[in-house]
Amino acid sequence: MGSADARAGHSRVRRLGQRTVAAIGRQDWLDRPSYRLEHVLTIAFASFGGARERVSNGLHGTWLGHPVHPILNTLPTGAVATTVALDAASMMPGSRPIREASRYALGVGIVGSVGAAVTGVADWQHTHEEARRVGLVHGALNGIATALFVASWWDRRRGRHLRGMAKTAVGYGITLGSGYLGGDLVYGAGLGTDRSGDRLTVSDWTPVLAATALADGESKRVDIGGVGVVLHRNGNGVLAIGEFCPHLGAPMSDGWIDRDLVVCPWHGSRFSAKSGEVLRGPATAPLHCYSARVCDGMIEVSGGVPPPVASSKGVEQ
């Protein structure tokens, strides 16, 4: 009976969380302030001039191959949790050193919150609709919690330790709720995860399309063993890439080639046409990139990276 009651309780909590996220996602009145914030961010990034791309890549984590925000977010989370634990211990007699340690830990959490906020906002500006609204509330709650942490640190510095403890406890409670929303953005909306889909593993050359069916500058999606591949005709050569952008799953059939770069149609991520390496965010994971050639009037694709092939049949790489 106890186990059944526990399962029922877990189910109620889960449904409450899902309903809360869905309710926030329906609040279209949040779109106006979110777009205004996006415009401010656009101006802020533009102010970096020629360094704009380096700053953007740094905040997104393109250089790391992984979003920076989740990594930085562990610092304030751990520091504030440490503060709460030290606050509990500081209630014992003769605990002045513990109080000093809790104030120090809280200061670390405040500094970490700033870093997490900057990287989080950089990622948020490329979200849409429901995810954008949930992300805005997530950021606002974190901002309120950080303000409480700052006020708590100041109270502690002035000797008002109990008041500071109360503000930290309230702020920590808010971050728990905000963390739930952040988890939904990652595991529900897929923000920060690799959305490129399945990778082609067939190593043999596979005919997929007549060369005459793909004009210069045109792109077309083909299916190879259940895996989507996008073909781009670029002069005499053919480029074969994954069907989706790793960032938020944009259809790469709507993308284009800019010199030796593949450009995402949604957020402008740029990938090397030769290797799929990310050269400009917000994407952090590489784009699937395959070998392609024109042989006897047919476009052939291979999931492997074989050496260049030449034969009397006439192969055009």
Image: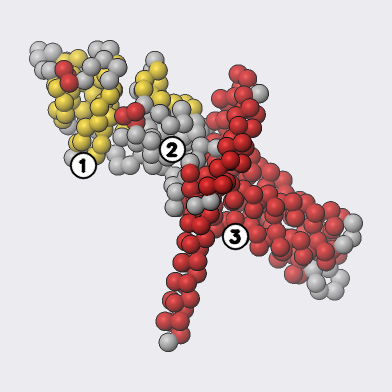
Q: At which x and y percent is residue 226?
A: 21, 41
Mark 2 Cα shell of 10 Å, populated few (<14), some (14-19), many (≥20):
many
Give the distance between the C-alpha atoms of the residues marked 2 and 3, in whole angstroms. 26 Å
Side of 22 where 150 appears, left or right: right
* Amino acid type of the residue tagged 1 in the rendering: Gly
What residue is at 27 percent from the left and 20 percent from the top?
218
In this rendering, does residue 279 appear at all?
yes
Q: Are marks 2 and 3 in contact (CB under 8 Å)?
A: no
Of residues 305 and 54, which is closer to you in this image? 54
- Left or right: residue 161 versus residue 110 is right
Q: Quadrant of the N terminus?
A: bottom left
Tell me the kind of residue under disc 2. Answer: His
Alpha carbon of mark 2 to alpha carbon of mark 1: how far?
Answer: 21 Å
Q: Residues within 10 Å of mark 3 (few under 14, many from 20)?
A: some
Q: Which residue is mark 2?
A: 247
What is the residue that sits farthest to the right in this orientation? Answer: 158
The reply to whether the C-beta atoms of the residues labelled 3 and 1 are less than 8 Å apart is no
Q: Residue 145: x, y in percent?
A: 69, 54
Horizontal side of residue 81 vs 164, given as left or right:
left
Q: How is colour applied across the structure in the image?
A: secondary structure
Q: Is residue 221 above or below residue 33?
A: above
- Amino acid residing under circle 3: Gly
Residue 16 rendering spot, x and y as whole percentages = 50, 66
Q: At 14% across and 28% down in the image, what residue appears? A: 207
- The residue tagged 3 is 177
**Which labelled disc corresponds to residue 226?**
1
Residue 304 visible in the shown view: no
The front one of 117 and 77 is 117
- In this view, the residue farthest toward the bottom is 1
In which image quadrant can residue 213 be found? top left
